[in-house]
Amino acid sequence: MSQPPNPEYPGGPGQQPPPPWGPPPAGYSQAPPGYAPPPPYGSPLPSARPGFYTDQGSGLMLPEGTQLASIGRRIGAYFLAIPLAIVTLGIGYLIWGLVVWGRGQTPALQVLGMRCYRPTEGKPAGWGSMALREVVGRFLEGILSVITYLISFVLFLTRSDRRALHDLVAGTVVLYDPAKTLSR
């Protein structure tokens, strides 16, 4: 026994009725200005701009010739900063830091071939971003001493983009740049 056709759905049997919630309001079907519409679920990541590639682990678009700094390299930079500060008597480390901040580095990052990068801008961190990262970010890490340092370390270990608390404050990621691609 078949049912009579429903006049609300003129296509008859087999045609899907429209969704009960109706069409989206005006302006909601497009992506925000400056952003591409998201790819359909399950499709591959969008291709990167020329000179960039999409890091599969983090989804960030990074310059070719660079990669996210490894966990071991980042921990090494943390511990290298201590003897560098001692050898340069502290004041030398501070002056060295102020000079290399403009290139998105700290003295330890410079020695190990790493650089801070702002993925939202597509360029290395500048002096202001580095000041925000090293002064404000490190101050926030030190507020509750061991607790905030541990939280920052856990964030760094568990996030796919390997950002610690001071990186989140400044919007930076640390890249290993063996070919000095970002200094050109």
Image (cartoon, rainbow, N blue to C red):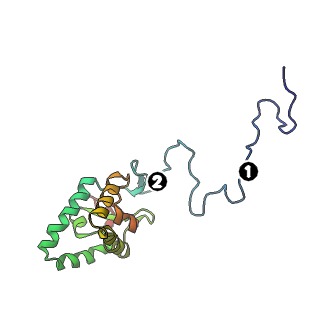
Quadrant including the N terminus = top right
Of helix, strand and loop, which one carries label 1? loop
- Residue 142 vs residue 181, the one in the foreground: 142
Identity of the residue furthest to the left in this view = 87
Quadrant including the C terminus = bottom left
Q: Indicate the position of residue 170 as horizontal and vertical percent values.
A: 39, 68
The crowd level at tag 1 (other Cα within 10 Å; few <14, some 14-19, many 20+) is: few
Residue 90 in sight in this render: yes
- Residue 23's label in the rendered image is 1
- Residue type of the residue flagged with mark 1: Pro
- Residue 163 vs residue 141, the one in the foreground: 141
- Residue occupying image coordinates x 69% and y 60%: 27
- Residue occupying image coordinates x 19% and y 62%: 79
Q: Indicate the position of residue 68 as horizontal and vertical percent values.
A: 33, 55
- Residue 48's label in the rendered image is 2
The crowd level at tag 2 (other Cα within 10 Å; few <14, some 14-19, many 20+) is: some
